[in-house]
Image (cartoon, helix red, strand yellow):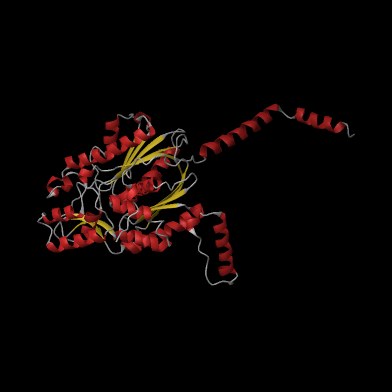
Amino acid sequence: MARSQPNDFTDRVRAFNHPYILLIGLFLATVVTLYIMQRPRKVYLIDYACFRAPSKYRVPFATFVEHARQVSQFSERSIRFMTRLLERSGLGEETSFPPKAAYIEGYKYCTLEEARKEVELVVFSTIDDLFAKTSIDPTTIDIVIVNCSGFSPTPSMPDMIVNRYKMRSDIRSIHLSGMGCSAGLISVELAKNLLQAMPQGARALVVSTEILTPNYYLGNERAMLLPYCLFRMGGAAMLLSTSPAKARFRLKCIVRTLTAADDRSYNCINQEEDNKGNTGVNLTMDIIDVSANTLKTNITTIAPLILPASEKLLFALSFVSVKLLKMGKKLYMPNLLTAFEHICVHAGGRAVIDGIQGSLRLSDEHVEPSRMTLHRFGNTSSSSLWYELGYIEAKRCMCKGDRVWMIGFGSGFKCNSAVWECIVPAHNEDGPWAGCIHRYPVRIL
């Protein structure tokens, strides 16, 4: 009987119909194929480039104030306010204005034509640098996304890019406007989602900038003079792909938070007309509290995605002890700094950086890239995060495997954050910090 068992098993296998075996194999192959197809692809940052204005566009404080004095619409009280604001702003003497906006009575030259020239100066030169760094043929780009809040011409800025670089006719182009200083990470997420629907290895060009030429404020409302004093010319271009070839960073996660349902949050940054009919952006005093509260909401979402298992375990044990067993008085707050080596906080202003540093209990070293970016380039809107990343790399602080937390804030009110993992650190100091990185960090009074 013992010898007959193998024969019995063989007979049963032979008796099983071959079509059933084929169907089972096809079913398993289909399941595996569907799983692979439906699984989100990883998205990589091939490289990035930031605009560095020629020195002839530099606007020192003395020049800014003297030119403001020549504008008859500004009162002496407003001049004194802007002077004090600049002295305490955290900006340095090397920030830049668009060519005609830096003229005396520059508002007279802030035309549509001049705004387009600013696009050509900032956007095209930055994309040229990116293509030179990556050796990418523009015709291989599948997606073009531009975010610029205050300038939305016809044809659009993505159309201008496609025309300049003679890209393919089947390219997907999108312009995001009115999304504020956090729009850069919104564009990254949009590119990430679009790349999921394209063939493996597709490429997306993302451009973040703010065109200042058409946004000249001529009133005397202090809350509307703030952006006029803080914003400066800048831009960044990023190349994303689902192919890891030549990639420098991997996108780990991205989380967006919008608190526009709350009136206080919704109204803290608002484009409007003052009582004289002058259009500008009104920044209320609520912005510091609103940004801190919105960041807390964002953190509750992103923390479970990026915290190490040890921090999650400590929090779980603390929760059980305090909430269920009533054995403790205070919940353990996970240490977010265990999830990152570097942090890039939007360089929107000195007060914003101070507020975030206090809320997250960050050291001066953690916010150094933000403060130095604000000092060297001013508030460049959504592109500021990439200047900060460039600062970290120019300082040779980035290593393979390091994680970077980017935090952007914008009107609405929005807080968007992304986490990148370094694959290949920069090999040189080419970029916006070339020629000046040796002077940083500087002491800001």
Q: Residue at x 48, y 47 (%)?
A: 402
Q: Position of residue 108 (x, y in %)?
A: 12, 47
Q: How many marks?
A: 0
Q: Quadrant of the N terminus?
A: top right
Residue situated in front as seen by the camera: 285 or 336? 336
Question: For this view, does 51 lie left or right of residue 16?
Answer: left
Residue situated in front as seen by the camera: 307 or 130? 130
Q: Residue at x 15, y 43 (%)?
A: 111
Q: Quadrant of the C terminus?
A: bottom left
Q: Position of residue 397 (x, y in %)?
A: 43, 48
- Is residue 263 visible in this depiction of the protein? no
| Quadrant in which residue 77 is drawn | bottom left
Residue situated in front as seen by the camera: 65 or 145? 65
Outermost residue toward the left?
A: 72
Please say if 8 is above or below 145: above
Q: Position of residue 394 (x, y in %)?
A: 38, 45
Q: Residue at x 25, y 55 (%)?
A: 230
- Is residue 22 visible in this depiction of the protein? yes
Outermost residue toward the right?
A: 1
| Quadrant in which residue 72 is drawn | bottom left
Please say if 187 is above or below 352: above
Q: Position of residue 371 (x, y in %)?
A: 34, 55
